Image (cartoon, grey):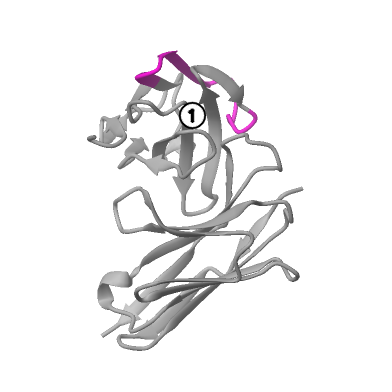
Amino acid sequence: GEDVEQSLFLSVREGDSSVINCTYTDSSSTYLYWYKQEPGAGLQLLTYIFSNMDMKQDQRLTVLLNKKDKHLSLRIADTQTGDSAIYFCAEPHGSSNTGKLIFGQGTTLQVKP
Amino acid sequence: DAGVIQSPRHEVTEMGQEVTLRCKPISGHDYLFWYRQTMMRGLELLIYFNNNVPIDDSGMPEDRFSAKMPNASFSTLKIQPSEPRDSAVYFCASSFGSRQQYFGPGTRLTVT
């Protein structure tokens, strides 16, 4: 069945780069998402990438997609304490337009000053 | 738009009591999702609706849980009777088609 896997925890120092990794199973996914959840809040869409792209850059964020290995990564440059949050990778459920997303377990990013 | 609105933000109740969580999706969105988040199990999809019709309720834990969407602007998630293991943060999210989901702030439920 469909599954999205992430490592659970990452700790970095302020100013360093953070790389959060994700593997997914559905090769027919048209796009993949990264959501951010700050303490005490709901999930917010951080960025997304279409499956016909290998890379997407948005300011400090870089998303890399390796379709062959079904591997997605999120790189945060110059990580700040405000980036401390849980980051979720998600893919659409199935190849049809169901509206449902499959979320990973979430990676807790801890940024040390 | 105000975003997805959930109420109450916090709910503390005793075991055995009925709990009703409420959600107002973003106007114009045709999908509505209910999620539960706990430390142990992470984020779980409980049920989702398309155009007010339940599409997939396979994530609903048991018969004590029920959800309704009487119209496009309102949904409820009811737990009756509640148990301590139902303690979690419950999120409602909405989307237009298969595009990004917008999450509400969540309801933190504590059952004592």
Residue density around tag 1, few if under 14, some if 14–19, many if 20 or more, within 10 Å: many
Question: Which quarter shows the C terminus of chain B?
Answer: top left
Q: Which residues are magenta?
A: B58-75
- Most distant residue in the front direction: A52
Query: Residue B41: image x %, image y %?
Result: 55, 50
- Most distant residue in the left direction: B2
- The residue tagged with tag 1: helix, strand or loop? strand
Q: State which chain disc 1 sits on.
A: B
Q: Residue at x 44, y 80 (%)?
A: A18
Q: Is residue B68 magenta?
A: yes
In the displayed structure, A75 sits above or below B27; it is: below
Q: Residue at x 46, y 30 (%)?
A: B83
Q: Is residue B105 magenta?
A: no
Query: Residue A75: image x %, image y %?
Result: 46, 77
Q: Residue at x 59, y 31 (%)?
A: B61
Q: Is residue A43 visible?
A: yes
In the displayed structure, A36 sits above or below B103; it is: below
- Is A52 situated left or right of B111 in this image? right
In the displayed structure, A109 sits above or below B103; it is: below
Answer with the quarter of the image where residue B70 lies.
top left
Q: Is residue B17 visible?
A: no
Question: Which quarter shows the N terminus of chain B?
Answer: top left
Mark 1: amino acid: Tyr
Towards the viewer: A55 or B46: A55
Towards the viewer: B24 or A105: B24
Answer with the quarter of the image where residue A37 lies.
bottom left
- Is A92 situated left or right of A34 in this image? right
Q: Which residue is mark 1?
A: B31
